[in-house]
Amino acid sequence: QKEVEQNSGPLSVPEGAIASLNCTYSDRGSQSFFWYRQYSGKSPELIMFIYSNGDKEDGRFTAQLNKASQYVSLLIRDSQPSDSATYLCAVNQDNYGQNFVFGPGTRLSVLP
Amino acid sequence: EPEVTQTPSHQVTQMGQEVILRCVPISNHLYFYWYRQILGQKVEFLVSFYNNEISEKSEIFDDQFSVERPDGSNFTLKIRSTKLEDSAMYFCASSEAVVQDRPYEQYFGPGTRLTVT
């Protein structure tokens, strides 16, 4: 059974700091990896995806992927109180859509 | 900006009743999905739909569930005889057609909160 693991948190960081969110996955055949943000009572909102080893940057967000270690992370630079949410890691086995396996999410709290 | 829409936002039903949850995917998207999230738990895949047929489904998606694309815009999830444990947030998502060597993102609707009493 495919598993995606995340620390549940809460992860608390001061405003302006870097928040580091981690995710591990069990299926070595996984191809693409997505980070979603979910505010309480709302739907998942796509932040970014990555499918090649290394780093991918998009504004204040950087995704890092290490397929050998089956590990993907999300860094949020210059964290803002509005970044306080649950961050969901989603893993897809191939590049053709189909289902995502979601992790339980990490709750991030950015303190003003 | 195009978005996935869902109706109703909240549905209350009695155990044993049938419910239909409705979704309008993004107009140029060809893949459609239903996920559910029980309160406090993780998002779980139910079913994916492409070219007017189910392409993949999870163990959760048993005979009580069905999906349909009744026209060119709507995508529905039907639960035939609801149980208490069906109470959850149900999310519809959609994604574009396959592009070679590029994973494509799934965009989620706002969800329907289903409460079974």
Image (cartoon, rainbow, N blue to C red):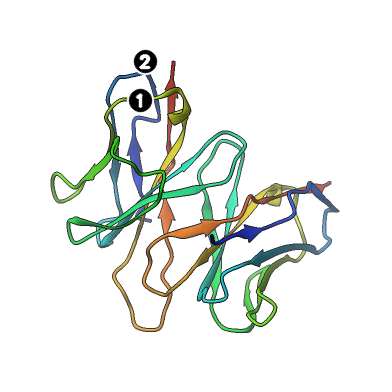
Location of the C terminus of chain B by quadrant is top left
Q: B2 left or right of A18?
A: left
Check the image and report above or below for B62 versus A11.
above
Amino acid type indicated by mark 1: Thr
Question: Mark 1 vs mark 2: same chain?
Answer: yes
What secondary structure is marked by label 2?
loop
Identify the residue at the far right of this view. Answer: A14
Cα separation between marks 1 and 2: 7 Å
Task: Residue under label 2, please give it.
Answer: B14
Which chain does the residue under circle 2 lie in? B
Mark 2 surroundings: few (<14), some (14-19) or many (≥20) residues within 10 A? some
Amino acid type indicated by mark 2: Gln
Q: In which quarter of the image is residue B22?
A: top left
Q: A93 left or right of A60?
A: left
Location of the N terminus of chain B by quadrant is bottom left
Q: Are marks 1 and 2 in contact (CB under 8 Å)?
A: yes
Of residues A99 and A57, the one drawn nearer to the viewer in this rendering:
A99
Q: Position of residue A78 (x, y in %)?
A: 77, 63
Which chain does the residue under circle 1 lie in? B
Does the image show residue A88?
yes
Q: Position of residue A15 (x, y in %)?
A: 83, 54
Q: A52 left or right of A23?
A: left
Task: Residue under label 1, please give it.
Answer: B82
Q: Position of residue B14 (x, y in %)?
A: 36, 15
Residue at 60%, 53% in the rendered image: A37
Of residues A101 and A43, the one drawn nearer to the viewer in this rendering:
A101
Closer to the N terminus: mark 1 or mark 2?
A: 2
Of residues B30 and B60, the one drawn nearer to the viewer in this rendering:
B60
The circle drawn on residue B98 is none
Q: Position of residue A92 (x, y in %)?
A: 48, 67
